[in-house]
Image (cartoon, rainbow, N blue to C red):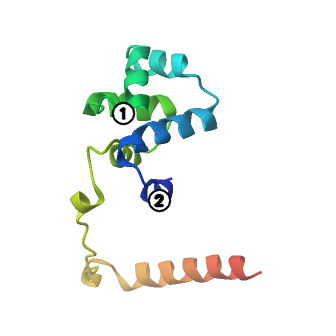
Amino acid sequence: MGDHIASMESPKNTWWEFISNAMERKGMTAAELADAAGFNPSTLSHWKKGNAVPRLELVRATAKALDVNFLDALLASGLLGLEDLKLERVKPDLSLVSDEEILQEAARRMIELRKRVK
């Protein structure tokens, strides 16, 4: 769901594009979204025109009403940027996993791989 966010060019319209695409996928009108998320329909008009930045609680309510990922909604709203995530890959500590668990996971992955190859 997050891939389309990075490809959008205009930060001012990203939030509205995100919302309108999600409403279209869900078959929801603006009035239905406003009702489900618990805000005034005029709020959507402000977002559409780029005259307002959504507050955190409205992003959360909108994401819930549209059944979309909250992180994707935060990114689209501009309240969170990719640079804010600063995720780091951590190497697993294999001493925390038994040899049997490692073998079971390897077997599970082999079965999945065979299913995909067929």
In the rendering, at what x and y percent does residue 106 appear? 51, 83
Q: Is residue 93 above or below residue 28?
A: below
Tell me if label 2 and label 1 are in contact, CB under 8 Å: no
Check disc 1 and give the amino acid type: Gly
Marks 2 and 1 sit apart, C-alpha to C-alpha, by 18 Å
Image point (53%, 35%), residue name:
20
Q: Is residue 74 above or below residue 58?
A: below
Dot 1 corresponds to which residue?
A: 50
In the rendering, at what x and y percent does residue 11 appear? 36, 48
Image point (25%, 76%), residue name:
90
Circle 1: is it few (<14), some (14-19), or many (20+) Cα within 10 Å? some
Image point (56%, 40%), residue name:
21
Left/right placement of residue 68 relative to residue 73 reads right
Q: Nearer the viewer, residue 115 or 50?
A: 50
Q: Secondary structure at mark 2?
A: helix
Image point (36%, 33%), residue name:
50
Check disc 2 and give the amino acid type: Ser
Q: Nearer the viewer, residue 101 or 87?
A: 87
Q: Nearer the viewer, residue 118 or 73?
A: 73
Rendered image: mark on residue 7: 2
Image quadrant in which you'd find residue 113: bottom right
Rendered image: mark on residue 36: none
Query: Looking at the rendering, in which quadrant would you find the C terminus?
Result: bottom right
Q: Earlier in the sequence, mark 2 or mark 1?
A: 2
Circle 2: is it few (<14), some (14-19), or many (20+) Cα within 10 Å? few
Image quadrant in which you'd find residue 101: bottom left
Image quadrant in which you'd find residue 107: bottom right
In the rendering, at what x and y percent does residue 108 appear? 56, 77
In the rendering, at what x and y percent does residue 19 appear? 48, 36
Q: Secondary structure at mark 1?
A: loop
